Image (spheres, grey):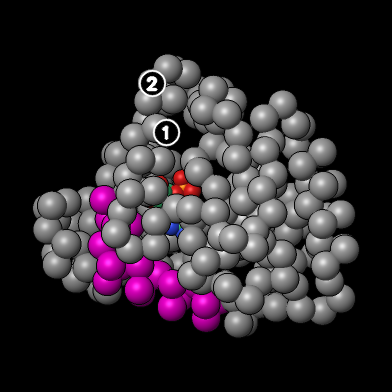
Amino acid sequence: PGQCVVAVDGPSGSGKSTVSRRLATAVDGVYLDTGAMYRAVTWAVLQAGADLADPEAIAKIALETELSIGTDPLAPHFAANGTNVDAAIRGPEVTGAVSAVAAVPAVRKQMVALQQAIITGHPRIIVEGRDIASVVAPDADLKVYLTASAAARAARRSAEDATDVAATEADLARRDKLDSSRAVDPLKQASDAVEVDTTGMGIDDVVAHLLHLLNSKV
Ligand code: C5P
């Protein structure tokens, strides 16, 4: 098949990134990590020393930030204003501030437009985020909502970045709450999305399941 857009939404630590990258490779498509876009903008906001409580200042910096967005599922490199930010956007400063930046309506408007342009330019794409099925790609061929128990999500994240499980679980809960309760495009399952609970499922099983769903759709 030619055109194929897959939306993968869900809370932090549900396995979205790993699963989306593997799926993109399996269908010989590209991968768009929209969370990394919000993280890269957050990096620029922190770099500029902007007040996180000032949405106008945040929006201004977001508009001025030149993003380079990698879509290779094996090496999705990101740069902001010419600086590679692959490591920095996973650090605690950015993780602590990203939900505040992503809650600014003007930032979301700009990111969604950018995401839609990238999707238009890449007809075979797996897009992961929070609002992909509902806002960014409402016409996606397959919409998946990945979940996992809070304990499973925290265990995965802390294994990834070698942090304490309890602290990670608290941070995930904090971001889920902010992401689900914000006024613009909150995290929620689209009515036409297939929910996949990955608690206790291995990565190969999840990818195989999604390929099966995709093959029965397109
Ligand atoms: O997926 P990841 O943890 O990298 O996303 C970081 C943050 O970016 C989320 O906590 C959320 O605040 C924001 N985000 C968003 N909409 C998206 C993707 C991410 O608001 N589509």
Q: From the viewer's perspective, is residue 149 above or below residue 61?
A: above
Of mark 1 and mark 2, the one earlier in the sequence is 2
Q: From the viewer's perspective, is residue 135 above or below residue 165?
A: below
Identify the mark at residue 156; answer none if there is no mark: none
On whether ligand 1 comes within 8 Å of the CB at mark 1, the answer is no
Q: From the viewer's perspective, is residue 26 above or below residue 139?
A: above
In percent of width and height, residue 198 lies at: 69, 36
Magenta stretch: dominant secondary structure: helix
**Most foreground residue, 134 or 34:** 134
Residue 128 visible in the displayed image = no
- Which range is magenta? 100-118
Residue at image coords 60%, 34%: 148
Q: Which quadrant: the C terminus?
A: bottom right
**Most foreground residue, 44 or 218:** 218
Q: Which residue is mark 1?
A: 172
In percent of width and height, residue 166 lies at: 42, 17
